[in-house]
Structures are given as C-alpha cells and as structure tokens.
DNA sequence: AGTACCACCTGACGGC
DNA sequence: TGCCGTCAGGTGGTAC
C-alpha cells in the first residue's frame, strides 16, 4: 500500500540504516524495474560511492548519491525497501540489491514490477517534469483549498490526482473521506472553502496518525476503516455493513450511514 | 476537465 | 488437486 505515509516510513527507515556506508557491490536482478537507465549506468552511479540523503515527494523516494545524482524509487502497487545482513535474509522479489562495506545489504523489493528505479538530476526537477502537485504532507491549508476548489470530479478522484496534490492513493483517500464523513463520489465542487479547509485538517490528521502507526494495519486506531476493506465487513463506528463501489475505476470502501 | 478502459506484472483466492 | 477467471493498494496512454 505504498502511499505518502508508507513512503515516509521507508524514508525514516533508510535514514536510520542506509546512509554513509560505502557501496561495495551493486546488483540489478531484473532490468524491467529500470526507468530510463541501464544496469551499467545504475552500477556506475553507485559502486564505491555512498548514499547521503533521503527525501520524499508524494509517493516518490529519492536517495542522493555522493556523485551529485539521485536514485529515484517509485514503488507502484507493491514494494518496499529492506536492510538486512545475511544472505538468507534476502526477501523474495528483490530487484536491485546494494551491498555496503559493513556487510549489510539494501534490497529494493517489487513483487509485481509495477514500480520503477532510475537516476534523476534532483528531486525538484523530477517533480516539475512529472507535473506532480505539492506533497500532501507539506501543502499549506490555503494552497490545498486553492488547488481543490472548483474541481468538477469526485472527491476521491480529486484527492488521488497526483498532479493536484501528490501522495494520496486508493486506500488513504477512502480513509480520509471516512473521517471527513464525506462519500467518495461526492463532487469536490460542492465543498466551499471552509469545508475544504476541514478536509485538509482531516487529511493531515489521518496521514500523521498513519505514520505514527508505522503505516502498519496492525497498529491502526480502532475506529479506522482501513482494516475493514473487504466484503461483508462492518463499519468500526456504527456497525453497519461497509459498502463498496468502483469509482473512476478504483475499488472504494465507505459507510453510507456515516458518510454523506 | 474528467472518466472509462486497457496495459504493464505477479500472485492469491474462490468456484468448479 | 488443478485449472481458470477475477482481483489487487499505481500509473500512463488513448478514446470519448
């Protein structure tokens, strides 16, 4: 479920584990994960170098190399990073593996290969070229209200549009709207500035709580919808049956009693 | 501007 | 047990 909270947790994990170690070996297991780069270029960018900074924008993660280049990672629908010591600790579906001088490895894992790994000049340039909106965890309330105000689509689609605000995906859009007590197919344009300001408050609250829970479903608060995303589940607030529907092609879960 | 649909991949699950 | 259709948390392209 890699959305902004998950990627933020990965960033903090990388900060705590993977910086300032010399890279002694670099292996690309499956080149299908590479985006506009080659195995050779990736190896040249990292071998005998090190990583010294991690940043995140929306669902994108950037690791600065000591050669003035950035490793860009996008996870897609499945994926994570793992820092581990022993060979037998290697996870399934590791696509790129760095080995550090301290004997530890860093694996970029992507089961479905829907993610990408590449090299970029710097995060700001990448964000501009891709046309990503401001990061959802950094955007000020006024800007959020300005960007979303008057949008004609559904609330869920608007929240998930990365070119407007970057970082919210299918799961957290549902969670945010559940706590905002708004249905996902409610039209964004029907919310006035006050209501959009309230939606910003809810968005920040939900995403920060998710990060506090290490984006782990096991640690989510009891009144969250997220652990109940399957057929026949009950709303954790009112006990009613959770409804589901495809909205703009994405599976959505909501409670028709709690949300309007 | 916004939505529908398909494609990219692998794997889990339910029905038969 | 095995085969098959369906679906999954992201994104991009095309058609409308």
Image (spheres, coloured by chain):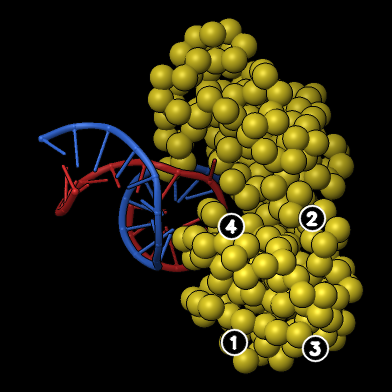
Chain colours: A yellow, B blue, C red
Residue found 81% across the figure and 67% down from its top: A18
In the rendered view, does A245 fall on the left or right side of A172? left
Query: Disc 3 marks which residue?
Result: A48
Query: Disc 4 marks which residue?
Result: A79
Q: Answer yes or no: do the residues labelled 2 and 1 have beta carbons within 8 Å? A: no
Work out how far the residue at label 1 is from the one at label 4, CA to CA, in angstroms: 19 Å
Who comes first in sequence, dot 2 or dot 1?
2
Q: In this view, does A49 lie above or below A8?
A: below
Work out how far the residue at label 3 is from the one at label 2, CA to CA, in angstroms: 22 Å
Who comes first in sequence, dot 3 or dot 2?
2
Q: Answer yes or no: do the residues labelled 4 and 2 have beta carbons within 8 Å? A: no
Q: Answer yes or no: do the residues labelled 3 and 1 have beta carbons within 8 Å? A: no
In the rendered view, does A186 fall on the left or right side of B15? right
Q: Which chain carries label 4?
A: A
How many C-alpha atoms fall within 10 Å of the one at disc 3: few (<14), some, or many (≥20)?
some
Q: Mark 3 lies on which chain?
A: A
In this rendering, the label closer to the viewer, 3 or 1: 3
Who comes first in sequence, dot 3 or dot 1?
1
**Co-location on one chain, circles 4 and 2:** yes
């Amino acid at each position: 479920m890699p959305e902004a909270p998950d990627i933020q947790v990965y960033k903090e994990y990388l900060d705590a584990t993977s910086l300032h170690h010399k890279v002694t070996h670099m292996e690309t297991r499956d080149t299908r994960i590479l985006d506009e780069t080659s195995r050779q270029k990736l190896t040249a960018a990292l071998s005998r170098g090190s990583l010294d900074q991690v940043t995140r924008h929306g669902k994108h993660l950037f690791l600065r190399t000591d050669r003035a280049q950035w490793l860009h990672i996008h996870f897609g629908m499945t994926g994570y990073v793992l820092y581990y010591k022993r060979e037998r600790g290697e996870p399934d579906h590791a696509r790129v593996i760095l080995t550090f001088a301290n004997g530890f490895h860093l694996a970029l894992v992507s089961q479905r290969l829907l993610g990408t790994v590449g090299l970029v000049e710097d995060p700001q340039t990448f964000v501009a070229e891709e046309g990503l909106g401001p990061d959802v965890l950094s955007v000020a309330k006024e800007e959020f209200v300005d960007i979303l105000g008057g949008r004609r689509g559904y609330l869920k689609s608007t929240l998930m549009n990365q070119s407007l605000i970057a970082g919210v995906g299918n799961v957290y859009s549902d969670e945010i709207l559940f706590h905002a007590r708004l249905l996902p197919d409610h039209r964004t344009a029907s919310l006035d500035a006050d209501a959009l300001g309230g939606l910003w408050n809810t968005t920040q609250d939900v995403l920060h709580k998710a990060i506090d829970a290490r984006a782990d479903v096991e640690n989510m608060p009891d009144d969250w919808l997220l652990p109940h995303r399957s057929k026949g589940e009950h709303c954790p607030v009112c006990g009613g049956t959770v409804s589901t529907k495809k909205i703009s092609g994405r599976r959505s879960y909501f409670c028709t009693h709690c949300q309007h």
